[in-house]
Image (cartoon, rainbow, N blue to C red):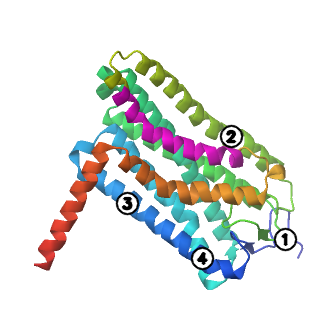
């Protein structure tokens, strides 16, 4: 029976990974396993430290805990599957598994983007309007900002996933990537990807640029507010509250914008793989260090958490 246009004949895809050379696989496995373990431990410790210290139950750290959780989920969407493929020497992924990976990857990368904008807005209110901060960033509004980010990003990921299901895959099934990314997958479709490409550029571009513009605008007002501070020490204190966030923003957008705004016909697989490693593996691994090492409150909370765990272990041994 001849398949209709909306059906597909390809039941699985072949992921080429980061390297096709067999002798490099053990090195890649060890490297990415180490980076993933550091990512998991770092982000879990950040969430536990914030949750266990009442002094950190503020909007800024509430957003940071959600950001760390999202980073953990983002890295877990791609890295474990890649490690399994390297270990078992089998690089295939089912059609359903590919769709699931695309959906969750888009969801968490978008959520990272939105939370960075929310955190910039929080810093703007704290520095530009300190007297109204407690009222403006109350607990209900903070929950609404995070919940709204989850809803919008879930819908965006679902739209792209559903658009992929209408495509036919009847030819090559090789994806030159280490996970099922949307852009390389569109190149394999036998049917027209015009709607998918248009949605990727218009909707995806808007959801990427919108939060980025929000971040830029927030920091423009923050800079003006800092310049109005008379005390040099006050200026330094205000700026130090933003340095960690600015570092993460620079790291995230320097790798993500090029991939997301490239249409499917002009995007190179090699460049995508390098950039994807940066914002799916390297960035989630570095973020806990950026926020903890450059933040006195976080270092204090981490020290308390470590002492509490050490004391618990000592008591248990006794």
**Foreground tag (1 vs 3):** 3
Contact, mark 1 vs mark 2 (Cβ under 8 Å)? no
- Mark with earlier residue (4, 3): 4
The residue to which callout 3 is attached is 44
Q: Residue at x 14, y 76 (%)?
A: 316
Separation of marks 2 and 4 at Cα, in angstroms: 36 Å
Q: Residues within 10 Å of mark 3 (few under 14, many from 20)?
A: some
Q: Secondary structure at mark 2?
A: helix
- Disc 3 element: helix
Is 12 left, or right, of 277 in this rendering?
A: right
First in sequence: mark 1 or mark 2? 1
Q: Are marks 2 and 4 in contact (CB under 8 Å)?
A: no
Q: Earlier in the sequence, mark 1 or mark 3?
A: 3
Q: Which dot marks residue 79? A: none
The answer to whether residue 228 shows anywhere in this view is yes
The residue indicated by pointer 4 is: 27
Give the residue number, with chain letter if any, for mark 1: 172
Pointer 1 with pointer 3, Cβ within 8 A: no
Q: What range is drawn magenta here?
A: 236-260
Instruction: Give the CA separation, mark 4 to mark 3.
Output: 26 Å
Q: Position of residue 117 (x, y in %)?
A: 50, 37
CA–CA distance in space, label 1 to label 3: 40 Å
Q: Quadrant of residue 99?
A: bottom right
Q: CA distance from mark 4 to mark 1?
A: 29 Å
Q: Residue at x 79, y 73 (%)?
A: 10
């Amino acid at each position: 029976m001849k398949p209709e246009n909306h059906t597909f004949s390809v039941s699985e895809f072949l992921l080429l990974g980061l390297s096709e050379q067999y002798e490099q696989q053990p090195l890649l496995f060890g490297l990415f396993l180490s980076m993933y373990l550091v990512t998991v431990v770092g982000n879990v410790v950040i969430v536990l430290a914030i949750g266990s210290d009442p002094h950190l139950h503020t909007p800024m750290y509430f957003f940071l805990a959600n950001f760390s959780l999202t980073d953990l989920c983002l890295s877990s969407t791609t890295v474990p599957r890649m490690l399994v493929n390297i270990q078992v020497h089998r690089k295939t992924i089912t059609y359903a598994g590919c769709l699931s990976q695309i959906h969750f990857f888009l969801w968490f990368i978008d959520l990272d983007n939105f939370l960075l904008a929310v955190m910039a807005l929080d810093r703007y209110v704290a520095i530009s309007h300190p007297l109204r901060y407690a009222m403006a960033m109350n607990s209900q509004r903070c929950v609404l900002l995070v919940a709204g980010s989850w809803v919008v990003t879930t819908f965006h990921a679902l739209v792209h996933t559903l658009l992929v299901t209408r495509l036919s895959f009847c030819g090559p099934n090789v994806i030159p990537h280490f996970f099922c990314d949307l852009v390389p997958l569109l190149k394999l479709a036998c049917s027209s990807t015009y709607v998918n490409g248009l949605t990727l550029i218009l909707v995806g571009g808007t959801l990427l640029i919108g939060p980025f513009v929000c971040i830029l605008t927030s920091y423009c007002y923050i800079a003006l507010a800092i310049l109005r501070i008379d005390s040099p020490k006050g200026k330094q204190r205000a700026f130090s509250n933003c340095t960690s966030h600015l570092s993460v923003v620079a790291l995230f957008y320097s790798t993500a914008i090029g991939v997301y705004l490239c249409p499917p016909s002009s995007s190179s697989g090699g460049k995508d793989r390098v950039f994807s490693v940066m914002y799916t593996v390297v960035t989630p691994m570095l973020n806990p260090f950026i926020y903890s090492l450059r933040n006195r409150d976080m270092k204090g909370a981490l020290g308390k958490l470590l002492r509490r765990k050490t004391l618990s272990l000592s008591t248990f041994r006794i």
